[in-house]
Image (cartoon, rainbow, N blue to C red):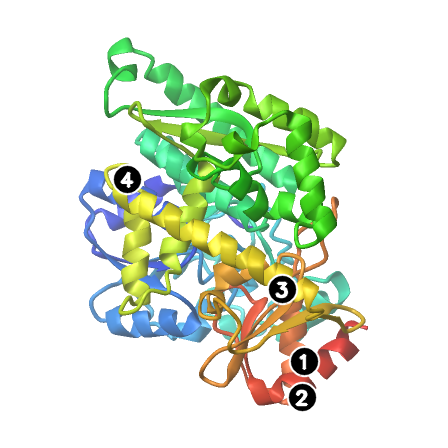
Amino acid sequence: LFYMLYLTNVKHVLCFQRVALLVASDIDALCACKILQALFHCDQVQYTLVPVTGWQDLGTAFLEHKEQFRYFVLINCGANVDLLEMLQPDDDSVFFICDTHRPVDVVNVYNETQIKLLIKQDDDLGVPPYDDIFRDEDDEEGGDSGNESDEGSEPSGKRRRFDEGAVERRIERQGSQYEYHGTSASMMFFELAWVLTKDTKDMLWWAVIGLTDQWVHDKITHMKYVTDIATMQRHVSRHNHRNEDEENSLSIDCMRISFEYDLRLTLYQHWSLYESICNSCYTSCNFKLWTLNGQKKLQEFLADMGLPLKQVRQKFNSMDMSIKENLRDVIEESSNKYGLKDIRIQTFGVHFGFKNRFLASDMVHATAALLESTEKDESDSDNFIKALDSLSRSNLERLHSGIELAKRKLMAIQQTVASCICTNLILSQGPFLYCYLMEGTPDVKLFSKPIALTLVTLSLMVFFDVEKGTVIVVGIPPESETSDKKNFFGRAFEKAAESTSSRTLHDNFDTSIIELKTDDRSKFLDALITLLS
């Protein structure tokens, strides 16, 4: 039905060609880009890197480069739409797509001439059989939909036979309208680098960061995360065993990756423990720190651990070694008494030389802060390059500046969440909750960016004013321990806009993030309530 495209095949095609590399603006895509850049460097493949923030960007980038390039590599964009219908490329244009967005458009799956999907074989795509969605008229080739990429299984060039009605009926019957995410793009490229025996520790670390990005931003289930962590742990063990020679392990510029069972306290090793607890979503929400009782509970929690306030409020690096040595065990013991049973999480850490240590989640937050920086005179492309640079261990200064930006962003998020709750800005509309942040809200500019807004809205749906008379709408599905992370809001937004003729822009690669005209907000909300009731 579908196949995994090994880089050995890609290498054969691309080694003698110039390639346009179109990369979405998310952390996993940046990490995948770094891995692919390293592979291209190994094989001396010439490429042009083009950041894309949405469908309009993607279309513009293709138009600007279609004359110079025949081959296009798309990272975390392009799989969940009929790409050939959207871009209208020439017949000799070929697209290599590695995209975590699901579901994958069925036309992309069955087109093997111009669309080459990089998909993990055990990823559940839920794609219907070829015969169910393509009509047989004007059939010039056999309808074999086996795994071989021969001409008999090849429906491309006959997309006129695509039966949209059959797909719509299947969507209604099986709920395929849910949006969700597959294996991270950076993991895919790392495993393919491994197949080519060209994987390095840097590539492995980038793959770890890409996976952690999916966990931090709640894109995959806990079970999927744990499974993928186990996969990465095997690769880490292999690399550590391969580089056990003493000379390398003691080098001043060495890199050591280690499996960690660490704390869910954001940036705590680069902050004070107190500030990290106050600004980490997990602890802040569990303690309800926006209330007096929550603040009192936090003080009791610190007292239960037996940690002096002077130690807790100073930089982590300045804490007494005797306290730091057993800190994780002490916090876990007290956390169990206060209902924080998941205070520790499986993750990875890295040492650069003797001094610099980072957790994978530190890298995610720092890189995201740089990517969505709201500093003046900085374009999206400038921020993209800065974020990409921060992933290189040779550019630690950039990474540290990202960490400082991330701290400010996390504090702004917690202040905004507290403000929304305390001033009753979160309203129930029956089937969903929504919160409307008006212009003039503190840190208003920060939350006009999708990643920052997603962190605010992991348990809410937020509407946000921006200067051009539109609101950004983010839909987050209900949270529970058994949540499958499938998001129904994208399809619901589409239907609500269609039924009310609301003026919307579905430009984000995540269908659950749209832009809506402010004047249409009321009728759009009414339609959404009716639709989801």
Of the two numbered discs 1 and 4 on the same chain, state the one appearing first in sequence. 4
Q: Check disc 2 and give the amino acid type.
A: Thr
Residue 451 placement (x, y as % from top left): 49, 59
CA distance for labels 1 and 2: 6 Å
Residue 328 in percent (x, y) is at 57, 25
Task: Examine the rendering and report whether any part of residue 520 can be seen.
Answer: yes
Asked which quadrant contains residue 464, the reply is bottom right
Give the crowd class for mark 3: few <14, some 14-19, many >=20 residues within 10 Å.
Answer: some
Looking at the image, do the residues carrying marks 2 and 3 touch, with CB atoms under 8 Å apart?
A: no
Q: Secondary structure at mark 4?
A: helix
Count of numbered circles in the view: 4
Q: Which residue is mark 1?
A: 496
Mark 1 surroundings: few (<14), some (14-19) or many (≥20) residues within 10 A: many
| Relative to 122, 7 lies left or right | left
In front: label 2 or label 3: 3
**Residue wearing tag 3:** 419
In the image, residue 8 above or below residue 440: above
Helix or strand or loop: what does disc 3 sit on?
Answer: helix
Q: Nearer the viewer, mark 1 or mark 4?
A: 4
Q: Depth-wise, is mark 1 or mark 3 nearer the camera?
A: 3
Task: Give the image location of residue 259, x and y in percent.
Answer: 49, 25
Q: Residue at x 77, y 72 (%)?
A: 532
The vertical placement of 103 against 338, above or below, is below
- Badge nearest the viewer, 4 or 2: 4
Q: Residue 38, labelled with which disc?
A: none
The mark found on residue 500 in the picture is: 2
> Which residue corresponds to the image point at 19% horizontal and 50% vertical from the top-left?
16
Residue type indicated by callout 1: Ala
The alpha-carbon separation of the residues under discs 3 and 4 comes to: 35 Å
CA–CA distance in space, label 4 to label 2: 50 Å
State left or right for residue 415 relative to residue 34. right
